[in-house]
Image (tube, rainbow, N blue to C red):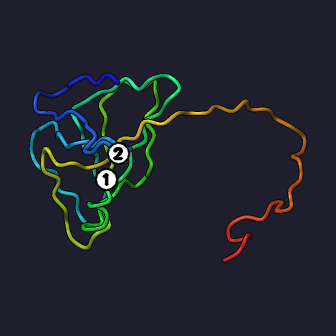
Amino acid sequence: MHFQRLRSDALLPRYQTDGAAGMDLVACPAEGAAVEVPAGEVRMIPTGWAAAIPNGYEGQVRPRSGLAAKHGVTVPNAPGTIDSDYRGELIVALINHGKQAFVIEPGMRIAQLVIAPVSRAEVVEVESLPGTSRGAGGFGSTGA
């Protein structure tokens, strides 16, 4: 996959182990300073990279489990989707569910990027849908 460096201090996304599904995205704020994420708020964290995701794939931006478990910092729209035709900077939305502010330092691993195949459905309008045993049963309708 091709990545374009947008800032000289940006660290290239990389897989941390041979079995890792996602490559780590690293914070690279445009001004080079730490970014505070106050409790209960969202901040957009730049990575300093643009990417060319292959056609037929998407980039899924997912939380890092350590940030979520230890500090309550996660990706609010997880997984966030990066479309294959997007060529702008990879920016990660982070929310702080913790009780105190959390500081994102430049060079900190902030999220994972998983590259996954995309299926596209043919959209067809119909007068009615085929029935199922569940029918229109929604939230909680299949049990506890």
Quick one: 17 or 130, which is closer to the camera?
17
Does residue 46 show up?
yes
Q: x and y percent of residue 86 in the render?
A: 41, 26
The amino acid sitting under disc 2 is: Gly
Give the residue at the far bottom of this rendering. 144
Is 85 on the left or on the right of 3, as rendered?
Answer: right
Residue beneath disc 1? 94
Q: Residues within 10 Å of mark 2 (few under 14, many from 20)?
A: few
Q: In x, y percent, where is residue 124?
A: 79, 32
Considering only vertical position in the picture, is 25 above or below 122?
below
Q: Quadrant of the N terminus?
A: top left
Identify which residue, 64 or 45, lies in the foreground.
64
Residue drawn at 78 percent across, 65 percent down: 137
Q: Which residue is mark 2?
A: 19
Left/right of residue 130 with respect to residue 139 in the rendered view: right
Amino acid found under the numbered disc labelled 1: Leu
Residue drawn at point x = 82 percent, y = 62 percent: 134
Q: Earlier in the sequence, mark 2 or mark 1?
A: 2
In this rendering, which labeled residue sits more in front, label 2 or label 1? 2
For the residues labelled 2 and 1, the Cα–Cα distance comes to 25 Å
Element type where label 2 sits in the image: loop
Viewer-nearest residue: 16 or 99: 16
Task: Say which residue appears at 86% left-offset and 61% top-offset.
Answer: 133
Q: Is residue 40 visible?
A: no
Q: Is residue 31 above or below residue 79?
A: above
Relative image position of residue 53 (x, y in whole percent): 41, 26
> How far from the left and from the top, in percent, is residue 72?
30, 66
Count every numbered label the image shows and give the total: 2
Q: Quadrant of the C terminus?
A: bottom right
Classify 10 Å Cα crowding around label 1: few (below 14), some (14-19), many (20 and above): many
Quarter of the figure with residue 39: bottom left
